[in-house]
Every structure is written in structure tokens, then in C-alpha cells.
Amino acid sequence: MKIAVRYYSKTGNTKKLADAIADVAGVTAETVDVKIEEDIDLLFLGSSVYAAGIDPKIKEFIATLSTEVKKVVNFSTAAILKSTYGQVSKLLVKQNIQVDPREFHCRGSFSLLHKGHPNASDILDVEMFARGILG
């Protein structure tokens, strides 16, 4: 199975999750600046909520994807909102790309909110999530 991990992170919170998922999958996590240029069976896509929405870089990345990406698994961080799943999946469906209904989300630190997150427990949780996805 061909697997890729891509993410966008302004503060490093989502990068922590991406690196943990990539370690479990045996691949390298890359930013969304690195395009997918080959057939991928499973793409772990990480984002965060900024001012109630996903960053334009995530939207631009999704627009470059094609059906050579068979399935996407969403993972995200946010200080206040629950998840990026709804926004990301809507864009992926428009690209005719299957979105796994399972997702991982945890709090990310922002200013004084959720200091230290994602923490060691969050990293263990995302590793377990990735193992579950990968079977």
C-alpha cells in the first residue's frame, strides 16, 4: 500500500501529529507545499482551524489532487473548534476523492489555551489511531 502524509501547520501543533503518523506508517511527513505526483492508496492530510476555517494552502493543495489519491484520512488540531473534517471532506468530495469517515482531532495550544498540546498523551493517541487505520 502506497501511503503519504501531508500537513499544513502555522504553529507546529499539526506537524507534531503528522510526524507521529508518518513514523507509524514508515514514511516522511511533508508539508502541503510538496505535491502528490504518484498514485497514492492512502493520504493522511493534516490541517488546523484558523479564524474558523482551514488555511488557503490546504484548499490549494486539495485542488491539485486527483483520483490517483484513492482515500484521504483527515487529522487536525484546533484551540477552539472541534475539527476540520467537514471543510476538508467537502473539498475532497468535489475532487471525487474518497474520505475515510474516521478522523483524528486534538486540541492545539494557542496563546494561553490548551498549553502544551498536543502533548505526549495526544501523540500516543494519534499513533494508535494511525495503527488502526493501517490495520
Image: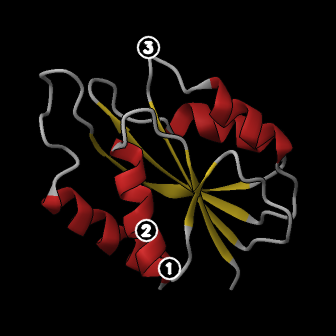
Name the quadrant containing residue 69.
bottom right
- In the image, what residue occupies the spot 58% across and 30% down? 87
Q: Residue at x 51, y 83 (%)?
A: 26
Task: Name the element at disc 3.
Answer: loop
Give percent across and percent down for residue 68.
86, 64
With 104 as the anchor, is 45 left or right in this view? right
Picture disc at residue 55: none
Tell me the distance, in whole angstroms, between the alpha carbons under discs 1 and 3: 31 Å
Where does label 2 land, which residue? 21
Q: Give the amino acid at mark 3.
A: Ala
Q: Secondary structure at mark 1?
A: helix
Which element type, helix, strand or loop, lies under badge 2? helix
Residue under pointer 3: 51
Q: Position of residue 8 (x, y in %)?
A: 54, 41
User: Disc 2, disc 3: CB below 8 Å?
Assistant: no
Evaluate if marks 1 and 2 touch, with contact meaning CB atoms under 8 Å apart.
yes
Above or below: residue 1 compared with residue 105: below
**Label 3 Cα neighbours within 10 Å, binned few <14 / some 14-19 / many ≥20:** few
- Which of these two is toward me, 95 or 113? 113
Please name the residue shown 69% across and 45% down the image.
33
The image quarter in which residue 17 lies = bottom left
Amino acid tagged 2 = Ile
Q: Earlier in the sequence, mark 1 or mark 3?
A: 1
* Label 1 environment density (alpha carbons within 10 Å; few <14, some 14–19, many ≥20): many
> Going 32% across and 71% down the picture, which residue do you hit?
127
Which residue is identified by label 1?
A: 25
| Disc 1 residue type (three-letter) | Ala
